[in-house]
Structure formats: structure tokens, C-alpha cells
Image (cartoon, rainbow, N blue to C red):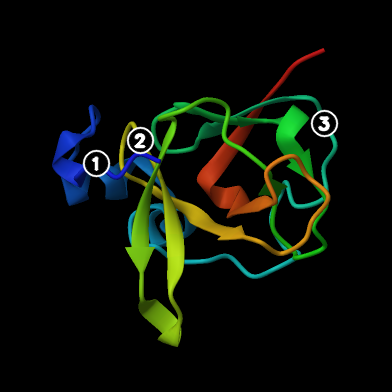
Amino acid sequence: MSTTESSDVPVQKTDDEWRTELTSEEYRVLRQAGTERPYTGEYYDTNTKGVYQCRACGHELFTSNEKFDSHCGWPSFWAPLAENTVRYLHDHSMGMQRTEVRCANCDSHLGHLFEGEGYGTPTDQRFCINSVSMKLLEQP
């Protein structure tokens, strides 16, 4: 797991630059660690083949091969596309201890990682990712 400091990420922009490039909802989730409502995101129930990229910088994060239906209301993946495509932070917000998942390229908030929930996946991990944090590059 990569736990680099945000100052170590390749893509760095000012807050004003992010605000001009992202919609208000994208900014709230990606740059302010917000969460979209469950069952409302574009990708929570899609089975389209392709690569999921960071909506802020285009960095490839996950593929449809690792996507699974966890019935949680957000897109779920059992692993990222490759080692070091995402980074992890300890999140103590909302009275819980969670693992926050961020883009390793631009430090945008993607969602959270949960482990040991008993899903029948190769890793028993659930990367619970906001649809608004990603864009799907469809592949035939």
C-alpha cells in the first residue's frame, strides 16, 4: 500500500485551478473528500467493460475485471489496476476508523477501502469508490 504524502504526487494544482476544471459535485467529492449518495452514481450498477480513470487527472485506477456487485450502492472493486495506482490514508472522520483511497497521481479522494467483509473475491477487499470520482474508458 502506498502512503505517500500529498506533496509527493505528480499532478499538483491550486484550489482555484481545481475549482475551474471540476463541476461543483466533482470538486466536493474529489477535493473535499465528500461522498455521493448511494445508488445515484453513474457506475454503481454498470457491467460495461473498460478502464476506470480518475475524473480529475485521467490516471488509470481500476478495471471492469475487478469490479463486483457488493450491493452497497457504490461501484466496488476487489483490487486496483496495479500497485501504486492509488494511495491510502487513515480516516478517522464520522466516528469511524476507515482507510481512505486517493488517486496516487493527483491526490483526489476516490472513496474507502474495507477489508474482511466476507465477499467471495480473491482479496476479500472492497474498494468502495464514488462514481463521480471516475470516468469509464470503454473497451470492446
Residue at numbered disc 2? 104
Taking the view exactly as shown, the residue that stands out farthest to the top is: 140
Q: Quadrant of the C terminus?
A: top right
Rendered image: mark on residue 48:
3
Q: Residue at x 83, y 50 (%)?
A: 120
Q: Amino acid at mark 2?
A: Ala
Residue at numbered disc 1? 4
Left/right placement of residue 119 relative to residue 52 reads: right
From the viewer's side, name the closer residue of 3 and 56.
Answer: 3
Left/right placement of residue 89 relative to residue 64 reads: left
Whichever of callouts 3 and 1 sits on the residue coming sooner in the sequence is 1
Q: Amino acid at mark 3?
A: Thr
From the viewer's side, name the closer residue of 11 and 96.
Answer: 96
Residues under numbered marks 2 and 3 in contact, where contact means CB atoms less than 8 Å apart: no
Horizontal and vertical percent position of residue 132:
56, 50
From mark 3 to mark 1, how far is it between C-alphas? Answer: 32 Å
Horizontal and vertical percent position of residue 110:
48, 50
Disc 1 is placed on an element classified as: loop
Disc 2 is placed on an element classified as: loop
